[in-house]
Structures are given as C-alpha cells and as structure tokens.
Image: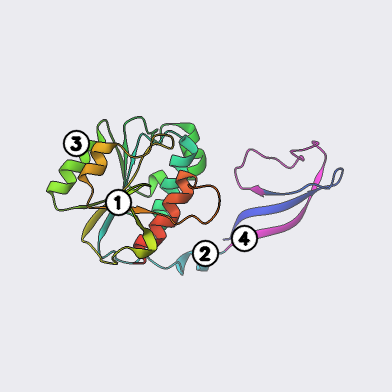
C-alpha cells in the first residue's frame, strides 16, 4: 500500500499554489483567501522505496556540538537538524540555550530532536573541562586574535571532538576559550563580519566533517 507524502494544491479563486502535507494544519481551503482548491500534483511513496533506504554509515569518530547561551530558539532547532544531517553524535545545550521542550525549537528542528541525542547543562565550562580531561579536542567557532580561518587549519582527524558556539551577542565565554585546543573562524569577504549562528554552524560542520 502506498502513502501520500504531500500534494500540490492550486486555489481556484486567487491562484495561490502551495504544498499540503499529510497531517498539516493547512487544509484543502486556500490559506490565503479560503477559496476552493484543486490538486495539481501529488507525491506518493511506495513500500519498496522504504525498503531500499540506505542504512546510516558507521561513524569513525565522535563529534558533538556545544551551544553555550545560544539564545535563539529557532537557531537551536536549526542546529539540531543540521547536526543530525552532518552526522554529529550529540548536542550539548548549556546555560540559557533553549531545549526541545520549547515549541520554537521543535518548529525548526522538524523531529531532529528525536534522532540525535541531546542534553542540558547549567555550566558549559565545567562540561568542557570534563570532556577535555577525557581526551576530547575542544574547538571554538569564534572571531578575534589567535583564531585560524577554517580553510587554513591543520586537517587532522580526532577520535572525539566538540565544536563550541556561544552567544549570538557576546560570543564564546572567555573561560571556555581558555580550555580550547583550537579556535576557528569562517572567512568573510563582504562588509558583514559574521553569519547567523545556525548558518555558521552548518558551514563549520561541513568543513570539519570533511577535513
């Protein structure tokens, strides 16, 4: 038996074209003008397609991301989703970083909070110090003195590593930076010198996982 994943509907009144997912709050009435709509296209998944899904590759090393006082709930949700997509193994949510019990987090994580392990911690410095004692390599994504651009860093694989991202406003806690084995930055070519924290994580995660 086949399941309908989504259908594209077109409003007969205003012409709005939009996707309607199974179980979505949108209905068959146009979300713009509440007019009648018709099906333009549908996407169906078959049982044999599910059976042919490739299993996840076995991971050679353990990679985690540590978010310290990263305030934006939507950014946290996006990072959870990206962390799972890039094959990270854990997300540490520290300080005032919102957790997936926040609806705004799950709005952007799209279920990733159920796929990647995560945990909350009051003090990121204590957590990072403990990881360092266990032999983890601690890496901060930051700007300023002593920072290497991510494309110029030494490309060495480590058994366990944690990538730290800090507050969108104040950056990474100085005591966390003091624990870091490495500080990296994303080279910026325009007038703005920084990226949205969720986008910055994705750029850094891709670079680190492919180094």
- Element type where label 2 sits in the image: helix
Does residue 40 show up?
yes
Number of marks present in the image shown: 4
The numbered mark at residue 70 is none
The numbered mark at residue 126 is 3
Crowding at mark 2 (Cα within 10 Å: few <14, some 14-19, many 20+)? few
Q: Which of marks 1 and 2 is in front?
A: 1
Foreground pick, 2 / 181: 181
User: Which image quarter holds the N terminus?
Assistant: bottom right
Q: Give the range drawn in magenta.
A: 20-45
Query: Looking at the image, do the residues carrying marks 2 and 4 touch, with CB atoms under 8 Å apart?
Result: no
The numbered mark at residue 44 is 4
Q: Which of marks 2 and 3 is nearer the N terminus?
A: 2
**How far is the residue under mark 4 from the one under mark 3?**
49 Å
User: Which image quarter holds the C terminus?
Assistant: bottom left
- Element type where label 4 sits in the image: strand
* Lateral position of residue 95 relative to residue 48, left or right: left
Q: Where is residue 61 in the image (x, y as percent from the top left)?
A: 25, 61
Q: Earlier in the sequence, mark 4 or mark 3?
A: 4
Query: Looking at the image, do the residues carrying marks 1 and 3 touch, with CB atoms under 8 Å apart?
Result: no
Quarter of the view holding residue 26: top right
Up the image or down, 43 lies above or below 193; here it is below
Identify the residue under disc 1.
Answer: 146
Identify the residue under disc 2.
Answer: 47
């Amino acid at each position: 038996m086949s399941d309908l994943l989504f259908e594209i509907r077109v409003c007969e009144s205003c012409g709005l074209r939009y996707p309607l997912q199974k179980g979505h709050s949108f209905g068959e009435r146009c979300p713009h003008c509440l007019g009648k709509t018709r099906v333009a296209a549908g996407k169906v998944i078959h049982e044999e397609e599910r059976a042919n899904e490739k299993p996840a590759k076995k991971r050679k090393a353990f990679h985690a991301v540590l978010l310290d006082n990263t305030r934006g709930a939507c950014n946290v949700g996006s990072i959870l989703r990206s962390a799972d997509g890039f094959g990270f193994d854990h997300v540490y949510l520290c300080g005032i970083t919102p957790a997936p019990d926040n609806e705004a987090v799950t709005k952007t994580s799209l279920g990733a909070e159920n796929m990647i392990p995560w945990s909350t911690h009051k003090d990121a410095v204590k957590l990072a110090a403990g990881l360092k004692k266990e032999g983890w390599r601690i890496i901060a994504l930051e700007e300023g003195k002593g920072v290497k651009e991510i494309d110029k860093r030494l490309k060495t694989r480590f058994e366990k590593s944690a990538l730290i991202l800090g507050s969108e406003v104040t950056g990474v806690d100085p005591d966390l930076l003091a624990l870091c084995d490495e500080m990296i930055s994303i080279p910026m070519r325009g007038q703005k010198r920084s990226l949205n924290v969720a986008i910055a994580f994705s750029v850094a995660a891709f670079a680190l996982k492919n180094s």
